[in-house]
C-alpha cells in the first residue's frame, strides 16, 4: 500500500460488524485509500491533485490497498499517515466489498459494495504529523475537522468517525497505530464508479474532478489487493 511513499508510518486495524446481527463480518474485502503526505492521490489527474500535467500519475497505485477481514471481522494494513489537500480535512476512504472473486494475479473482481465511507483523525494528532517532513512542505490550505462538511455529516446522530490511535514511541516520528470498528448493513448494495481504469496497456480517465474520486483505481475491471502483513498489537 505504501509503494515507497514517505511519511509517518501508520498501522491500520479496521473491524467490520454486521449492523443487523452484531456479528463480525468475515471475508469482507476492505478497500482503503488516501492522499500522500503532500495531499496527492494516485491514479488521479486533476487541477487540485498535484501537477495536473503529469499524466503518469494515472498509472500509480500508491496508498491504495484491499485486504479481507478475518474471522473476527478485522482487516489490517500498513500505510503512511495521510496528508491534506485544500477544502478537506485529513481523511481516509473506505469501501466494503463482498461476494467477489480473488483472481490468480492477486486482484479482486466483481461482488457488491455494502459500505462507502470515510475515516477521520484526531485534530491534535493531525497537527503533530503536519509539523514534520514531508507534511510540513504541503502549503495547501488546512481545513479543520470541525469545518469539513463530510466530517460533520459523518459525525451526526452520535456516530464517531474519528479513528482511535496510540503513538508507537515518544513522538509521531516513531509511527502511529490507528483502529476503528464499523457497523455495516450487509444487505446494502452501493453504486461506486472508479475515477480511472488501469489496463495492461493504458489508463482511461472517467472524471477529472478530485471530488469524484470516490473509488479505487482499477486494473482491467479488478481491484489491487494489498499484501497482508500481520500486526501483533494489543487494543486497550
Image (spheres, helix red, strand yellow):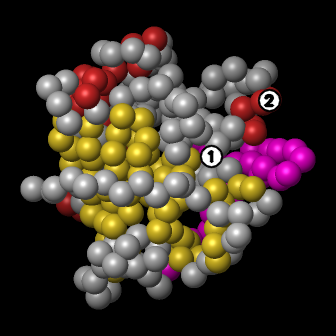
78 in relation to 38, above or below:
below
Q: Which residue bears the numbered disc 1? A: 213
- Residue 179 in the figure: left or right of residue 45: left
User: Is residue 27 covered in magenta?
Assistant: no
Task: Magenta stretch: give its range.
Answer: 188-213
For residue 105, which quarter of the picture? bottom right
Residue occupying the point 83% across, 45% down: 203
Rendering quarter of residue 7: top left
Q: Please give left or right for residue 218 compared with residue 5 in the image.
A: right
Determine if the magenta segment contains residue 203: yes
* Rendered location of residue 128, percent (x, y): 25, 23
Place of residue 50 in the rendered image (x, y in percent of width and height, measured from the top left): 63, 23
Q: Is residue 231 above or below residue 103?
A: above
Q: Which residue is nearer to you in this view: 235 or 35?
A: 235
Residue, disc 2:
55
Which of marks 2 and 1 precedes in the sequence?
Answer: 2
Amino acid at each position: 500500500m505504501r509503494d515507497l511513499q514517505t511519511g509517518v508510518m501508520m498501522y491500520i486495524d479496521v473491524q467490520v460488524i454486521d449492523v443487523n446481527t452484531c456479528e463480525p463480518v468475515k471475508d469482507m474485502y476492505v478497500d482503503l485509500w488516501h492522499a500522500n503526505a503532500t495531499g496527492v492521490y494516485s491514479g488521479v489527474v486533476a487541477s487540485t491533485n498535484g501537477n495536473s500535467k503529469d499524466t503518469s500519475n494515472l498509472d500509480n497505485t500508491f496508498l491504495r490497498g484491499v485486504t479481507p477481514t478475518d474471522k473476527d471481522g478485522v482487516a489490517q494494513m500498513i500505510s503512511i499517515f495521510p496528508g491534506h489537500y485544500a477544502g478537506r480535512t485529513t481523511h481516509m476512504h473506505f469501501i466494503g466489498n463482498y461476494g467477489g472473486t480473488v483472481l490468480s494475479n492477486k486482484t479482486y473482481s466483481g461482488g457488491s459494495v455494502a459500505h462507502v465511507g470515510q475515516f477521520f483523525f484526531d485534530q491534535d494528532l493531525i497537527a503533530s504529523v503536519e509539523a514534520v517532513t514531508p507534511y510540513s512542505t504541503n502549503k495547501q490550505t488546512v481545513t479543520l475537522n470541525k469545518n469539513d462538511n463530510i466530517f460533520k455529516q459523518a459525525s451526526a446522530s452520535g456516530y464517531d468517525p474519528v479513528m482511535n490511535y496510540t503513538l508507537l514511541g515518544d513522538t509521531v516520528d516513531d509511527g502511529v497505530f490507528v483502529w476503528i470498528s464499523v457497523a455495516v448493513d450487509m444487505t446494502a448494495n452501493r453504486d461506486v464508479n472508479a475515477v480511472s481504469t488501469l489496463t495492461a496497456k493504458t489508463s482511461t480517465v472517467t472524471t477529472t474532478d478530485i471530488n469524484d474520486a470516490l473509488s479505487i483505481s482499477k486494473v482491467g475491471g479488478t481491484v489491487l489487493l494489498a499484501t497482508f502483513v500481520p500486526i501483533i498489537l494489543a487494543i486497550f
